[in-house]
Image (cartoon, rainbow, N blue to C red):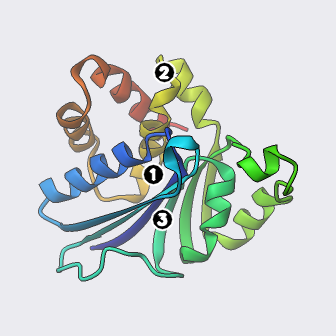
Amino acid sequence: MDKNILIVGVGGQGTLLASVLLGNLALAKGYDVKLSEVHGMSQRGGDVVTHVKISDHSVKSPLIEKGEADIIIGFEKLEAYRWLPQLKKGGAMFVNAQEILPMPVVMGQAEYPENIDQTIAETAGSVKEFDAMAIASSCGSTKAVNVVLLGAASKALPFEEDEWMKVIEENVKPKFVELNKKAFTMGQGA
């Protein structure tokens, strides 16, 4: 198996935990895994991108080049849109319907792009866009949006539900484990 997965969002959305969960699960299954995180003013709501490469062979480079991502998990629409060039032809996208306005838009120096949904739909092989924030909120915390999205994306990955649950137990603070398990399950059903 060779899977290239981009996890994209803005600071504070939990993209890094999502990449840790995915990476640790793949390692536990015996795959070679490389993670590379890129932060752009992430503590101030800037973009955060994690490249996750999983292979049953040796992974040489941690970065996913243009047109090589099998899956993009977008924690908000604009970031998913911005990273579309990385998606390979026929690739899958799992996108939170949330829109977080970047500072230039907030300040009136730029406009939010139009037709994001249409462009994503025309570019990706398959798209699952849904309100992951509402699902996370119904589970008890909007901070679980990351695990909701992993639940949705898990259908495109070769790991069993019990393996996901185990990696959540091993990597999430004990008081949040049950909430995150519920978020994952709800994401699977989205």
Q: Which residue is mark 2?
A: 141
Q: Please tell me which residue is depicted at 50% across the width and 39% down the height of the picture.
A: 13
For residue 32, side relative to residue 139 (left or right):
left
Q: Is residue 159 above or below residue 32?
A: above
Front-lying residue, 13 or 21: 13
Label 3 or label 2, whichever lies nearer to me, is 2
Q: Amino acid at mark 3?
A: Ile
Residue 89's quadrant in the figure?
A: bottom right
How far apart, in angstroms, are the residues tagged by discs 3 and 1? Answer: 8 Å
Label 3 close to label 2 by CB (< 8 Å): no
Q: Which residue is mark 1?
A: 153
Label 1 or label 2, whichever lies nearer to me, is 2
Label 3 close to label 1 by CB (< 8 Å): yes
Give the x, y percent position of residue 188: 45, 40
How far apart, in angstroms, are the residues tagged by discs 3 and 2? Answer: 25 Å
Local SS, label 2? loop
How far apart, in angstroms, are the residues tagged by discs 1 and 2? Answer: 20 Å
Near mark 3 (Cα within 10 A), the count class, few <14, some 14-19 or many ≥20, is: many
Q: Please tell me which residue is depicted at 86% across the width and 58% down the height of the picture.
A: 114
Q: Which residue is mark 3?
A: 71
Q: Is residue 140 above or below residue 9?
A: above
Front-lying residue, 123 or 46: 46
Q: Is residue 117 above or below residue 55?
A: above
Residue 130's quadrant in the figure?
A: top right
Local SS, label 3? strand
Q: Amino acid at mark 2?
A: Ser
Q: Amino acid at mark 1?
A: Ala
Residue 119's quadrant in the figure?
A: bottom right
Q: Please tell me which residue is depicted at 81% across the width and 50% down the height of the picture.
A: 105
